[in-house]
Image: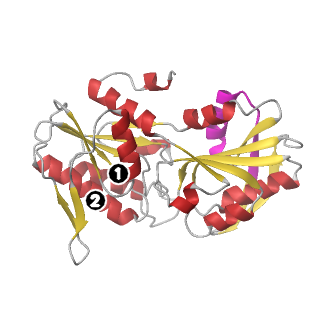
Amino acid sequence: MITHGNKIELLAGNSNRELADAIAKELNLSVAAAEVGKFSDGEIAISLPNTVRGKDIFIIQSTSSPVNDNLMELMIMIDACKRASAGRITAVIPYFGYARQDRKARPRDPITAKLVADLLTTAGADRILTMDLHAAQIQGFFEIPVDHLYGAPLLARYYKNKMNEDWVVVSPDVGSVARARNFASRVNAPIAIVDKRRPKANAIEVMNIIGDVKGKKCLMVDDMIDTAGTICQGAEALMKNGAAEVYACCSHGVLSGPALERIEKSAIKELAILNTIDMPEHIKNHPKIKVLSVAKIFAKAITTVYSDSSLSAIYED
């Protein structure tokens, strides 16, 4: 493996071209030409018209819906660069899909996070640059370096000027307490916890609120929101326990299935999400949804990786 290229080159698949262009703009670069399409039978077809020999390649691609197409695009682009003698290949994955199955919760369960890690490594990636993995231990599934970025500083910066002693940070479930505690320390706010139990698959019953939320503005913090069932039921429980208002934020707005309808009908006043996943215009412009850009932090991270400097320094401002 060559550990460093002699020039930065950005490539992008189809998953989030708007973010890729924004990252390129921050770096005063352009996304290099790449033909990313399909054969008539649906197979992914990739062609790189320009040389990548000896270059430090950063391929920007979230493995979001359609997750299988986007994952295959990423792996085939990595393979194309490897076979074209790129100096180093970094897979920049703002949203890392297939991460929710990170352990065997039941007999005969797959561990898809490890499978995808192996696929990316076998394809030829030399490094991974991603944000807010569903579980931090997924970094250990890779045999190559993983640079793990955090969305909390961006979200905390957005909310910090709005918050005062009337606010409380809320974990939507017991498993997210560490994330909520970290966020609360950034905005100098107390925390509360939505305690719930799951009587059966895909059904959530909120049981109790741990902490004082009466008369408070509550901010629920999560890493991702998919169908929005947990976050909306949590908002309802907070209001029933005397909360004045409920807000929510997350790094990855998957927002699949009934998510948007649930958010519209819920007590949530505003949902702030990062643009790690490309969203249609009606979601971006929705009155309840605020989209914050991660382009600057990924641009800084790419520069840091290329220059072999400290990644933690990018959060200092």
Query: Relative to the observer, which residue lies in front, 247 or 50?
Result: 50
Task: Check the image and report above or below for 143 versus 264.
Answer: above
Indicate the quadrant where residue 15 lies.
bottom left
Residue 232 x %, y %: 71, 59
Which amino acid lies under the numbered mark 2 shown in the image of this protein?
Glu
Residue 220 x %, y %: 70, 46
Q: CB of mark 1 within 8 Å of CB of mark 2?
A: yes
Q: In the rendered image, which quarter contains the N terminus?
A: top left
Indicate the quadrant where residue 148 lies.
top left
10 Å crowding of disc 2: few (<14), some (14-19), many (20+):
many
Residue at the image point whose x is 74% and y is 54% from the top:
268
Q: Is residue 243 visible?
A: yes
Which residue is labeled 1 in the image?
61
Residue 243 x %, y %: 85, 47
What segment carries the magenta color?
175-195
Which amino acid lies under the numbered mark 1 shown in the image of this protein?
Gln
Q: Main secondary structure of the magenta part?
A: helix
Indicate the quadrant where residue 5 lies.
top left
